[in-house]
Structure formats: C-alpha cells, structure tokens
Image (cartoon, coloured by chain):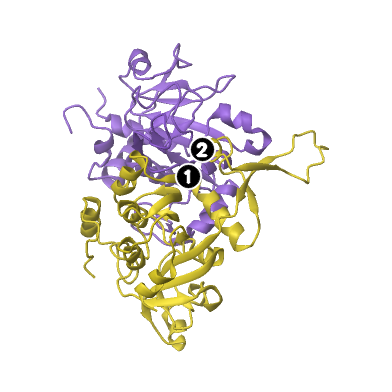
Chain colours: A purple, B yellow
Amino acid sequence: MSDVTRAEVCVAACAEVWRDAGEVIASPMGLVPAIAARLAKLTFAPGLLLCDGDADYFTDPTGAAAHLEAHIPYRQLFDQVWHGSRHVMMGASQLDKFGNQNISAIGADFARPKAQLIGVRGAPGNTVNHPTSYWIANHSPKVFVEKVDVVSGIGYDRARAAGRAARFHHLHRVVTNLAVFDFATPDQRMRLRSLHPGITVDEVVAATGFVLAGTDNPAVTLEPDAEALRLIREVLDPKETREREVPSAGKS
Amino acid sequence: MSVDDVVAELRDGMTVGIGGWGSRRKPMALVTAIAKSSLKDLTVVSYGGPDVGMLCATGKVRKAVYGFVSLDSIALDPHFRKARQAGEIEVSEFDEGALQWGLYAAALRLPFLPTRAGLGSDVMSLNPELKTVTSPYHDGEDGEDAEELLAMPAIHLDVALVHMNRADRYGNTQYLGPDIYFDDLYCLAADKRYVSCERVVETSELAAGGPPQSLKINRMMVDGVIEAPGGAGFTSCVPDYGRDEAAQKAYAGGDLFVEASR
C-alpha cells in the first residue's frame, strides 16, 4: 500500500492543471490549489507567476530565495485577465454539467436569497476571458447540481450562446476530493477523467447530482512522484494544512 | 474639513462610491459617521467590505452596487448577508472587472464601455437594464460573426469617499500601500470627492514620502480633505497599519462600531 494521502493526490492533480500553461498568472483559490500552484512552479511549470495575496509576485515559491519579479495591482490584474494571460482555479458552491458555477447566492429568489455568498466576483470575466479550472474539496450532490441558482462563472452551454465574443472560454479541469474531470465530450459536458486511488465509479456517481459522462473506463489519478511528495511534505506544506481541506481517515 | 462636515454635504437618496477593496483601506471614519447619521436611501457603490455591511446594518442602504462583499480574512460579511437574506436592499451585482469599467466610463464621461465580462452569466438577466453592443467594425470578411459585447453602463456617483495615507491641504493625495485599487476612478466618476487621510502634510513633504507615482489622486480630483488618523478603522492601511483582526472579528460578531487599536 502506498502511504500517499488523498490530500497529496489532490495537490498533484491540481498542479497538473497548470502543466503547459506557459508564462501566465496562476491564481489558486483554496489551500490545496495554493500548494499545487507552488508545486507546479517549482517543478514542471516554472513560467507561472504567483501572487503573494496582494499585488506582489515573487520568484521562488518556497520563499527561501524569493525576489520580487512583478507588481500587478488590481487594475493591471483585470488587464491581464482580459488579455487572457491567466489560468484561475476557483471554487464553487454549485457546479452543473456544463460547468456553470455559482458563488453568488443560494435560492430561487435573488431578491431575497436563502444564503448570500460572496457575489459573482470576477467569475463572469474570468471564465469568458481565460482558462478556468475548479477545485471542489467536498464532492457532493449539493455542489454538483442539475442547475445552479446564479450562473457566475459560465459553462459551455452559456459560452456557446454568447457566440464569438466568448471564444476564449475554456474550462480545463475540475478536481475534487474524489476524482478529476474534463469537458471533452462532443457537447462539452463534464466527463470523469480519472478516479483518485481507492475511489469507485459508484461513489462518484452517487455524489454527483447529474448524469456524468465517461464512467465506463476512467483512468486512475496519478500519485505525486517522490520529488513532488518531498516538496509537498517538507517544503511547501510541512504543517499539513492540506489535511484541513481533504482529511485522511482517522485524522480530522 | 471634518468628518461631520462631509456628512452634512450628503443628502438622502444619493449615490455614494466608497473606495478601498474588501477590508483594505476603507474610509471607515467617514462610513461610521454616515452610519450614525440620519441619512437614508443611499445607493452604495463599492468593492465591498465592512463599509457595505455597516451601512446595511444601520439601515442606510436602499441599493448596493458591487462585485463582491467580503472581509478578506473573514470570507463573508454577516451584516450584508443578513440584509440580503431579509430582502431589505436592492442590489446590482456585477463582475468586478465590469464594475471598474462602469466607473471608468463615468470618469471618461462615456455612456458605456464594452467588455466580455458578464456575457453568458446571470449578471445579464439579474440586471435587466444591461444591454449589449455589436462591434461596428465587423465587416464579415473573415466569415465570422460579429462580436456582441456587454455595453457596461457608466456608474455615475454623486459623492466619492476614499481614504489615503497622506494628503496636503489642497487635495494632493498619496497612497503608500501596494495598490490604489479604484480610488482614482471613484474620484473622477463623482460630482463631489472627499478624501480622508492618515496625516495632512505640507506639499513639500509629499515627494519625500514615496515615489512620484504614489501621487495618483491630485487636487483636480478632490473637493475636500479630512485628516483622520486611524481613519481606515480596523481595515488595513499599510504601511501605516495592518488590519486589526480582533476588531474585525468583533465587528463581524455584532459589535458594529468597535474601536480598532491603533
């Protein structure tokens, strides 16, 4: 038995999102994606630019020999977003089969929502301008729904309807605590791409509120290699914050 | 000017733009004075933080215009949520980049600016006043359809309130932190512009305090300067001070007018 935890598999799977992204801003939202983006920059995606949470971008994601390499205040960040030089990994309170995302509000009546969330934020602009992936730490039918309440980040059906102006729309991957998904079907629906080690198709289907494509022959998500594991455990996340988002059995 | 002088200039029903971002460099001294005043029915335009929450909790807001409302280290502002979930306020929720575009259009005295940010999303249906514009330069020769873009309408402000690190008495102001956010656009988009600051200094001192590009908002863009040390409240105003997380927690817990330790 491998001693690799599920959280570590998730870190490696999220890092893969930025493989071949080139020289772009990687904007991870969430603990696991934040570790993943730094892992990607340290290993196979050195071109990534990573923000310190404000407007400064540093060279070395370990922090050991970090030099300021870019200063991108919000005004310029929107320029980069609209220019397309960014790949964001957002979260979602709801996500549907075409990849429509909701981070705005829950409930049928927007004038009086059951739960007000953060707001659409930059999700409409992100998804229509540059590649977007999603990280869902708790894969459940409450998140993966037939129809989201407020379309914030747009999915493939909405992008198609928006026509040529939405031609830069690209949903790359959805990574969850159970599996990895893409949208590589003829009508661009969410498709099971790989199951994390130990997870079954039935578990994923039961946790998803719409019919999934790709359930016949899914691959198994690759585990991080020895060097990636060392970086995750010793350099990037020695305090195991990743366990807070994806707890191992027996830990909490 | 004093904080109270600014409040005296405001009227019920005005559209007030509030600078800063989330829980960063918010003009909380001014916001608190409005919250404690008899003003009502305000339209508040903001990259929302505790400014929006405090004004909602005190019944000052008829309508909020925003892309998000967040306290940064506390993801959601409970006072704003409560007002929304009770159906107490009208809202216009836009993509945060499109919100910038609305302020920029108002600043440039244009009716709108085109953008992709919002297309296909429920921002379009939840704000039925939004219209699209088809590229007038499309000749069809490439065999492609013309691009149909969101015509983001100008967001004109009656009043802009922002908080800076330094200013002189003429309205030349200086930010010393990492980001001006959209404060200069708020000033250009508004009829009346009031800037609170940590310290009023002589004009001759401004250049010594930071690089020339830190002098982004100048006296052409400002109608009144208010010296208000600690005027960002518990929100961050680096390098003068960071966020007072304990005070923010108390605010979120219901202690609306908690004093930040500065």
Of A79 and A177, nearer the camera is: A79
For label 2, the SS is helix
Q: Which residue lies at the image location 82% right of the left edge and 41% below the top edge?
A: B139
**Apparent side of residue B141 relative to residue A19 in the rendered image (left or right):** right
Q: Amino acid at mark 1?
A: Glu
Image coords of residue B104 (percent x, y): 58, 59
For marks 2 and 1, give the CA distance.
8 Å
Write down the quadrant of residue B202 in the picture: bottom left
Same chain under badges 2 and 1? The reply is yes
A97 w.r.t. B160: above or below: above
Give the residue number, with chain letter if any, for mark 1.
Answer: B93
Write down the quadrant of residue A130 in the picture: top right
B222 w.r.t. A193: above or below: below
Give the residue number, with chain letter if any, for mark 2.
Answer: B126
Q: Which residue lies at the image location 34% right of the left edge and 47% below the top edge?
A: B80
Of B82 and B75, nearer the camera is: B82
B228 w.r.t. A190: above or below: below
Query: To which chain does the residue with label 2 belong?
Result: B
Q: Amino acid at mark 2?
A: Leu
**Apparent side of residue A99 relative to residue B199 in the rendered image (left or right):** right
Q: Are marks 2 and 1 in contact (CB under 8 Å)?
A: yes
> Considering only order in the chain, which callout, 1 or 2, is on the residue closer to the N terminus?
1
For label 1, the SS is strand
Image coords of residue A171 (percent x, y): 52, 32
Image coords of residue B119 (percent x, y): 59, 38
